[in-house]
Image (tube, rainbow, N blue to C red):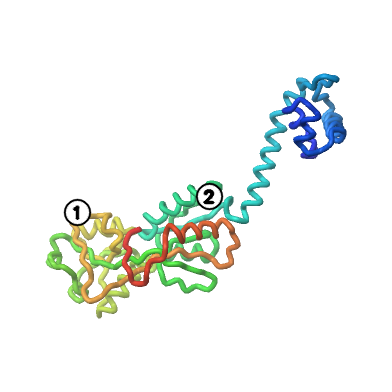
Amino acid sequence: MELRYLAAFVAVAEELHFGRAARRLQMAQPPLSQLIRQLEKELGVQLFERSTRSVRLTSAGETFLEPARRVLEDVDVAKRAATTAATGEYGRVTIGFAGAASHAALPRLARAVRATHPGLELVMTVQKYANVVLESVADGTVDLGFVRMPVDRPGLRARVIANDQLVCALPIDHPLAGKDEVDLSDLAYEPFVGLPANAGSTLRDAMTRTCEEAGFTPQVVQEAPDSNTVLALVSAGVGVTLTLKSVEHICQGGLVYLPLADRTVLLPAALAWRTDNPSAALRAVLTIAEQELPTPRPGVLTGNL
């Protein structure tokens, strides 16, 4: 059954006048009458009762009208989806995230996308650590990832959206807790709590690297799967840790957060994507992200988005 038959039928059914229906369809009346006859022949039923003075739907025509309208509406939606997909107004974008880098930034981006591109679907996939998210972007599992710099993989691009700072978290009754800042050398013989080693945590890597630059390897006595648990263990007196300034809000009781003396360690948060991803929907999200999550000036601390 051709769509032009359905368009002709709906026009006549709504106008109940062949002349008006023909003008609406921008065609002559005889071809319109021919389309209706061909449709009735194909269906094997009479759709209209015609007289010299009036046109009325038969019971078959009344039953056929709503399904015909729905088909035409669905086709119109499909056409609009196809033509607007090139601008990113329709489609799906999968986003990978982990840790504090995305806890405030992701909702902000999602709200902006929903407000400007309601036909765009965002699929959120949570992963444990930023390096795991980066792997997912690289292998195409997700379209866009909240990651930590540096991103130096071939075929990937990244844009910094925030600069976070490494700080020291101490139990509130620790001898160093009353200081304004902490010298890393004073932590050389302290027990540490940290995220798992070799699991893809950029924070664990940064803690180890920063301590080694200060002349010692942190002695991690207990590992925990996430920052919430790490900070709870520090609060319980299990050890100290280096964490991000953006997670200070997670655990306030029993903890003191101190800046590092003589050094500022920034861990830039970024969005990463594959350069060969052809998705117009992804391009639309990236454009919105540039407005909602602009790149800060180099070295400027932005903390938790």
Q: Is residue 114 left or right of residue 83?
A: left
Residue highlighted by disc 2: 117
Q: Is residue 9 left or right of residue 277?
A: right
Secondary element type, mark 1: loop
Q: Quadrant of the C terminus?
A: bottom left
Look at 47% across and 54% down and name the residue there.
125
Residue 253's disc is 1
Look at 58% across and 63% down and name the residue there.
277
Q: Amino acid at mark 1?
A: Gly
Decide if residue 200 is in sight here: no
Decide if residue 77 is in sight here: yes
Q: Is residue 292 left or right of residue 71?
A: left
Mark closer to the chain start, 1 or 2: 2
Q: Quadrant of residue 59?
A: top right
Look at 20% across and 57% down and name the residue there.
235
Could you say which is closer to the camera, residue 32 or residue 90? 32
Instruction: Note whether 221 is above or below 69 in the view shown.
Output: below
Badge 2, how many Cα within 10 Å: few under 14, some, many 20+? some
Instruction: Note whether 88 is above or below 186 in the view shown.
Output: above
